[in-house]
Amino acid sequence: MRGSMLATILTCVPALLAAQQGSSSASAKASAQASVSIPANYSADARTKIEAAFQAARAKSLPEQPMQERMAEGQAKGATEAQVVTAVQNVETRLEAAQSAMIHAGRQTPDPSEVASSEQAMERGATEAQLETLVKHAPADRSLTVALSVLAKLEAQGEPVDQAIAAITSKLDAKAGDDALAALAGANGSSAAGATVSGATSATGAAGNAAAGVGVAAKAGKGVTAGVTGAVTGAVSGVVKPKKP
């Protein structure tokens, strides 16, 4: 009797464990999907695509906040669900590319805030290669959140990407603090990066112009001197008549 009861229990245990595992997996999936705030009026197809994008982000430990923000932005602006789906998918793709660029540059575990700032910079035109260049100019233990955020802001202000990166990496090479980096974007939205990069060129040009101005003035001075001398000579020769022999 006891033997048959024990056999029955042993036979049921694997099934119970499998059921529990399946239930846990389903609960985890439901919990993950519940954390994605998808509009209730979206179609099943749109919901599936958005959920897939978030799952891909979780699989690579990417920050989800940029995707949530883009979805909320789309709703606020009255975008269609197709436009929102595309926007969310594009953000996820850029997050992957940003993370990959930072890893290639030597940061094995990029901070989520760094990845998010990199994604913004890429959205405005920065390439993976340009991000790698910026990252390589900073020590591995220094946070690049501010530097990457400044890059995105400079791009938004219309600064060429190469020029913005040159200004930022110059500060990083000089071991400048985050305050100095933030100042590149300007407190009032005006950019100081252009002045930082082109200051030396402008100074050289100004010096050349000044030298040219001095040369012109010198030539003009000589002309004035010659004119005065001629006028004096003419006046004297006109007043004093030569003696007759």
Image (cartoon, helix red, strand yellow):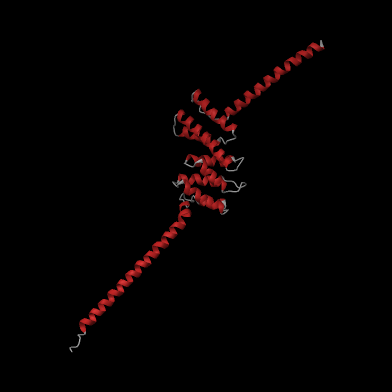
Q: Where is residue 71 in the image (x, y as percent from the top left)?
A: 50, 33
Q: Where is the C terminus found, in terms of image quarters?
A: bottom left
Q: Position of residue 40 (x, y in %)?
A: 51, 26
Q: Does 139 appear above or below 96?
A: below
Foreground pick, 162 / 22: 162
Q: Which residue lies furthest to the front in this view?
A: 245
Q: Which residue lies furthest to the right in this view?
A: 2
Seen at 37% across and 64% down, the residue is 212
Q: Does 63 appear above or below 49?
A: below
Foreground pick, 125 / 46: 125
Seen at 53% across and 52% down, the residue is 170
Q: In this view, does 77 lie to the left or right of 112?
A: left
Q: Where is the N terminus found, in terms of image quarters?
A: top right
Q: Position of residue 149 (x, y in %)?
A: 52, 45
Q: Position of residue 76 (x, y in %)?
A: 46, 34
Seen at 63% across and 26% down, the residue is 28
Foreground pick, 196 / 45: 196
Quarter assignment of residue 224: bottom left
Quarter assignment of residue 234: bottom left
Q: Does 45 appear above or below 188?
A: above
Seen at 60% across and 27% down, the residue is 31
Q: Residue furthest bottom?
A: 245
